[in-house]
Amino acid sequence: MKTPGPWNKVAVVGAGMIRFGELFDQSYEQMAAGAWRACRESVDLGLDPSQVEAMFVATQRGTLWGQEGIGGNTVPSAIGLSGVPCTRIENACPTGSDAFRVGAMAVASGVHDVVLVIGVEKMRDKSAEEGLLARAAGGHPIYTRGESAPVLFAPFATRHMHEYGTTKEMLASVAVKNHYNGARDPFAHFQNEITVDQVLAAPEVCSPLGLLDCCPQTDGAAAVLLVSAERAQEFTDSPVYVAGFGVATDHPYLHEKQDYLGLLASRLASARAYEMAGIVPKQLDCAEVHDCFTITEILDIEDLGFCEKGSGGAFSAAGETAIGGSMPVNTSGGLLAKGHPIGATGIAQIIELWWQLREQAGPRQVALKNGYALQHNVGGRGSGVSVVNILTRNAK
Amino acid sequence: MSTPRECHSAVLSIGVAAPTLRLHVAQVAAGWGRAGGRGQVAVCGPSEDALTLAWLAARRAITAAGILPEEIGGVWWGCTRPPFAEGPNLSFLSAALRLHPQSEAALLSGSPHAGIDALLAAADAVISGRVSTALVVASDSLLPALGSGLEAASGAGAVAVLLAAEGPATLGQVTTEWSPVLDRYRGDLETETREVYDGRLFREQVFLPLCQTVGSSLSADPSTRWSLPDPDGRLGRTLGERLGSIKVVSSAARSELGDTGAAAPLLGLAAALGEPGNLIALGFGGGRATALSIQVSSPVPGSSVVQQHLSGGQEVTYTEALRCRGQLVASGETVEMAVPPGSAMFVRGSHEMLALLGARCLACATVNTPPNVHPTCIGCGAIEFEIIPLPLHGTVQTFVVNQTMPAPFVAPLPLLVLDLEDGSRISCQGASDGSDLYIGVPVELQLRRYALERGVPIYGYAALVATASDNSSERPST
C-alpha cells in the first residue's frame, strides 16, 4: 500500500444521483434506475450499458426493511443490467463509501475494467417508529437498549462540551453552514437556509442535540462508474482518480470507547488513506464528511486532521469550514441538509467531490489548489467502522 | 388453637424498598368523578415491579449485615403476585442477588399472608440447622380492580431481613388462625384484584375475628409496639382499638406507601427494629392471620435508614399511575426487541445480565462486558478470563437524555456511560428523568425491569444518582 504519491489505479468517469428527499412516489427500484440513468448520462464520451462488467449495490438495512435485502439480485434487473455480476455490500453508515472502495479494488485487481457502484436506500417507506427508531430495541437486550441513532453520538457532545468548552452555538454553526450549502444544491433534501437561533430553539431530540442538530430520514440513490486508470480516457477527458482509501474498525459497544472526545475508527481510517494517497490534510481542497449530527462534524474535522483536537467547535463557528473558508466541508449540504439515505450517502458524497474536482459545482464550487478531496463516513454500533476515500484530479 | 408456639431464630439486619411514584387518593376519587379521598399510595414506575423492589430491599439488608451474598443459605420470598405467574421468579432473584448457585429458594404466594409464610419457613430452615443464614424477602406491587375501593388502598413496597441463630433481635412466639373465607379475590384469568364483600361484613365477620384472636394470644405489655394489617386505611385503627389501646408503629409505613400486601407486617415494624423492646407483627390474608413476637435487644443494622428509604417519591396523576400499572395502554404496535425472550441469547446471557457480571482478562485485567460476546480481550487480545461481579457504584463518564423513543419506550430516557469503582466501564439506562445527571456525579446501579417483552419481563441495571445511605462501597469480592 505504501506508494509515493497518489494510488491512482482507478478512475471515476461517471457520477449521477437523484434528488434526495421523502420519495414516497418512488420504489427502491425506481430510485436505482434514476441514479443509473444520471450516472450513465454523465459519462462525457458516452457509455454503452454492455460495457459494465460488474456491479456493487450498497444498501444498509437488508431484509429488516423489505425487498432491498436482496438488492444484489433486484437492482441489476431494475436498471436493465440483469445478468451482470452483482454483489450487495453492507457496512453500517459507511456502506456506500465501502462499496466504492470494494469496487475500486475489483477494478485494480484486474478482474473487471468497468464497474458500476450504486447506492440505494429507502428510509421512509416505514414510519420512523418502525424504521430508524426501532433500532432502539435492537442489539443487546440490556447494553444497547434504547440506543437509537443519536445515542451513538450525543454522549460525545456532552463530554466534548465538558472538556473543551464547546457550545451549543458552535454545534449550531455546523447546521447553519450545511443548510446554507444545501440551499445551493439542487439534489439536497432540504434546500432552505436556517439560523443559529432556529437551531437552538428546536425541540430537544437527545440531549444536548436538538432537532436541527440531526440529519433527516431521507430516501435516495446515487451511482458512480469506475474504470481502470489506463482506460479512463475512453470515457472522459476529465477523470477523477482514486488517490487512496482507508477503512478501520473499533469495538462496538458505547462503553468500549477509549474516550468520548473523538472517534478512533475515523482517525485510523484517515491515517491509512492519507498514507496511501501520499498527502497530508492541508493538501485537501475540500471534504465531504459524516455529519449525521452536528457534533459528528465537529469530531470529524478534528479526527481527520483539519484542526486540533478540541478546537473543532471554534473552527466551525469561525467559518473555516464554509465555502471560501480555509477548509470547505460538506459543500453539498452534508447529511444534515442533503440527507442520509444510508447506502447512497457515501456515493453521493463522492459525486459532490467529483463535481468539485471537475469544477462543475456551480455556486458551491471551491477554489482548487492542490486537486485533492476527501470523503468520510463513520457509523455502526459504537461508531465502530469508518471509511475514508481520497480523490484527486491529478494524474499520477 | 391460639396457643403460641416458639420460633427461635434471630434477625441480623433489615432492608426496605419503596417504589418511586406516589398517587394521592384524591386523584383516584376525582378520576371517577367523586370528591374527597385522603392519603396516598405507592405505585411502581415503568421499570419497577415486585421483583425489583425485592432485590433492592434484599441488597440493603445484605449490605447492612456486612456479609457476602454467597454466605446466604437461601432466599424465602413472599409475594402475593410475583412477576411471573409461572416462571423463574426465584432463579432470577437469586441470580440478581449473586447468591450461591446451589442456594435454597422458596416462593410463598397467593395472598398477602405470604410475607409471614416466608418468614416462618426461613426461620424453620435456620432452626433446623439446614442453613446458617436465611434471606427473607416480602414484596408486593398490587394491582387493584378499576373503580374498586382497593384503588385507594393498594400500594407497593418491599422488606427483607436476614435470619440466623443469633442476632440483635430474636423471633419469639407465633400464633396462626385460619378460617375458610374469602378476603380479596383474583381468579386465574384475571389481572386485577377485586373486593368481594360488603365492607362491614368483611370487617366484623372476616378480618377482625381472625386478627383479634391471634393478636390477643401473644403476651404483650403496654410498651409492646405493634405492626397491624390495614387493607383499607381504616381497619388497622379499628383492630388496634379492639386489641385495647395498644401502641401501633405500622401507621407511618402505611400512610407513606398504602397497603403493601405481603410486605406489610414486616415493613410496618422495620423502623421499630432500631429501638430495644418487644414488637408484635400481625399479618393477614387468604383467610389466615398470624401474630409473631420479636424481642429487640439492640438496634438491628439497617433499621436507622428505613424511614429515609420509605419517604420521598414522585407524585403522579391517576392517569400516569394507570399507565405505569399497565391498566391504560395505547393502541397501536410497539417496537419488538430484536432478541425475543425465548431465544438462545437469553439462555447464554441471562445470568451475566441479572448478576451484572464482567470478564476480567487474566493477562491485562481489562474488564470485558458483557462476557458472552467477548471471547477475546478488547484490551490485549488474550482469551482467558475470570468472571467477576461488577461494582454497583460508579460515576458518570458521559450521558444523554433521549427524548424521542418509540413505544414501548418511555421518554425521557437517560442513557449513560459509567466508570465503575473497579475501573471497568458499562453503558446502561438511567432510572430518573435525567435532570439530575452531570458528568462525574456518583451513581448506584439498581435492578430494573428494562422491558415487558412479548409479555415477559426483562431485567437489567439502571443508574440513579447515589444517595448518602446507598453510597457505601461494595466489599471487593461481591
Image: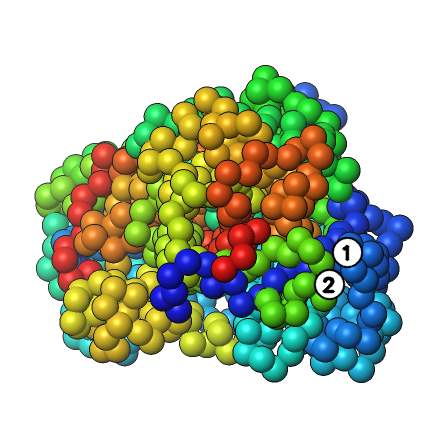
Three-letter amino acid code of the residue under disc 1: Asp
Percent from the top left, x then y, of residue A126? 76, 54
Percent from the top left, x then y, of residue B242? 42, 37
Give whichever of A64, B412 is nearer the camera: A64
Q: Residue at x 70, y 41 (%)?
A: A360
Q: Which residue is mark 1?
A: A44
Q: Residue at x 38, y 61 (%)?
A: A4
Left or right: residue B70 compared with residue B403:
left
Left or right: residue A9 compared with residue A310:
right
Three-letter amino acid code of the residue under disc 2: Phe
Left or right: residue B244 compared with residue A60:
left
Q: Could you say whether the residue bearing mark 2 is in a helix, strand or loop?
A: loop
Q: Residue at x 59, y 67 (%)?
A: A229
Q: Residue B198: in sight, yes or no? A: no
Do the CB atoms of the residues marked 1 and 2 lie less than 8 Å apart? yes
Give whichever of A244, B203 is nearer the camera: A244
Identify the image quadrant of the N terminus of chain A: bottom left
Disc 2 sits on a residue from what chain?
Answer: A
Q: Residues within 10 Å of mark 1 (few under 14, many from 20)?
A: some
In the picture, residue A56 is in which quadrant? bottom right
Circle count? 2
